[in-house]
Amino acid sequence: MRQEFEVSEEYSGERLDKFLAQIYTGQSRSFFQRLIKSGQVTVQEQVVTKNGTVVGMGDMVHVQIPEAQSVAIQPEPIPLDILYEDSDLMVVNKPKGMVVHPSAGHYSGTLVNAVMYHCADSLSGINGEIRPGIVHRIDKDTTGSLIVCKNDAAHIDIAGQIRDHSVTRVYRGIVCGVLKNDEGTVTGAIGRHPSQRKKMAVNPKNGKPATTHYRVLERFQKYTSVQFQLETGRTHQIRVHMSHIGHPLLGDELYGGTSKNYHINGLCGQTLHAMTIGFVHPSTGVYMEFSAPLPAYFEELLLRFRR
């Protein structure tokens, strides 16, 4: 499948492999590095075979996506909480602790294993043998709404909406400390942490623009229940932005909201829920919106804090 893209000002000066990885949301740079080396990518009609190539505004990039290989990951009969399903896509409510796609140390029990069993052969193949059907993702300990695409046309369409920041994404979370303002906006370019590989950080030097809007729903003695709306969708965006302003998500050990420090026993990972997702259906052109109910542990925390 051959696709064509024009480089916008936002991506001018990026390495070619990095540009493609951002255009095809959810795919790795290493995947495109392999395509470049094999001569499957052209810039301004010239075949590129070196990964150091930089693209400029207005460049026309063509990429030949190979047919998906046979999938090495095994389907598993894992129950799915399906919020919506048709022949193009489905929206699932991912539980806490489930990894979205297989990776080192997580080759079974993932969302991909589950959707492969549920969908059989009807999943998009753009992401090759590792992540069939996955057009975007949420973190292991974040719960909530996630789109899974069943064919390549739906995958490309939804990926484009995500890239253009037109997908509605509303989250619920509990942060440490009491937010003073009823609502606000956090801005700050997010990139890889300069010294800790597992972390992202507000980093103007290598980061991409990121904007998170928040609204206080309820205040407690030591915590705040918050609704977030993403204007962009950077890795760990809400977690990074809230930690940056001194209010990390409760349970987020990576970014400073450890449950141990805040006397919440048994909490595993950040208290963050992808509640609502909205998008234009790739076949009908109709805007659709789905909401996943708060998980039980989240509701129990709210009840506890109200006492």
Image: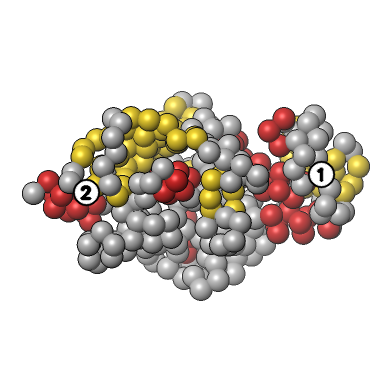
The disc, 1 or 2, on the residue closer to the chain's N-terminal end is 1
Front residue of 182/136: it is 182
Residue in the picture at 77% in, 46% down = 16
Residue occupying the point 41% across, 48% down: 243
Does residue 270 appear left or right of residue 159 in this picture? Answer: left
Across and down, in percent, residue 247 comes to 35, 46
Q: Is residue 160 visible?
A: yes
Tell me if mark 1 has few (under 14), some (14-19) or many (20+) residues whose alpha carbon lies within 10 angstroms of its own: some
Q: Amino acid at mark 1?
A: Val
Image x and y of residue 31, in percent? 70, 57
Q: Residue furthest left?
A: 307
Residue extending furthest toward the top = 286
Return the residue at label 2: 222
Against 168, residue 203 (above or below) is: below
**Residue 265 image position (x, y, % from top left):** 22, 66
Q: Which mark is residue 282?
A: none
Q: Which is nearer the eye, 216 or 77?
A: 216
Q: Secondary structure at mark 2?
A: loop
Asked whether the viewer can see residue 145, the reply is no
Image coordinates of residue 237 in percent, x first then y, are 48, 45
In the picture, measured across the screen, residue 255 lies left or right of residue 227, that is right
**In this figure, which residue is indicated by the disc labeled 1?**
54
Q: Answer above or below: position of 126 versus 213.
A: below
Q: Amino acid at mark 2?
A: Lys
**Left or right: residue 214 compared with residue 28:** left
The answer to which quarter of the image holds residue 171 is top left
Q: How far is disc 1 from disc 2 in space, using C-alphas? A: 48 Å
Q: Is residue 304 above or below residue 114?
A: above
Q: Nearer the viewer, residue 208 or 28?
A: 208
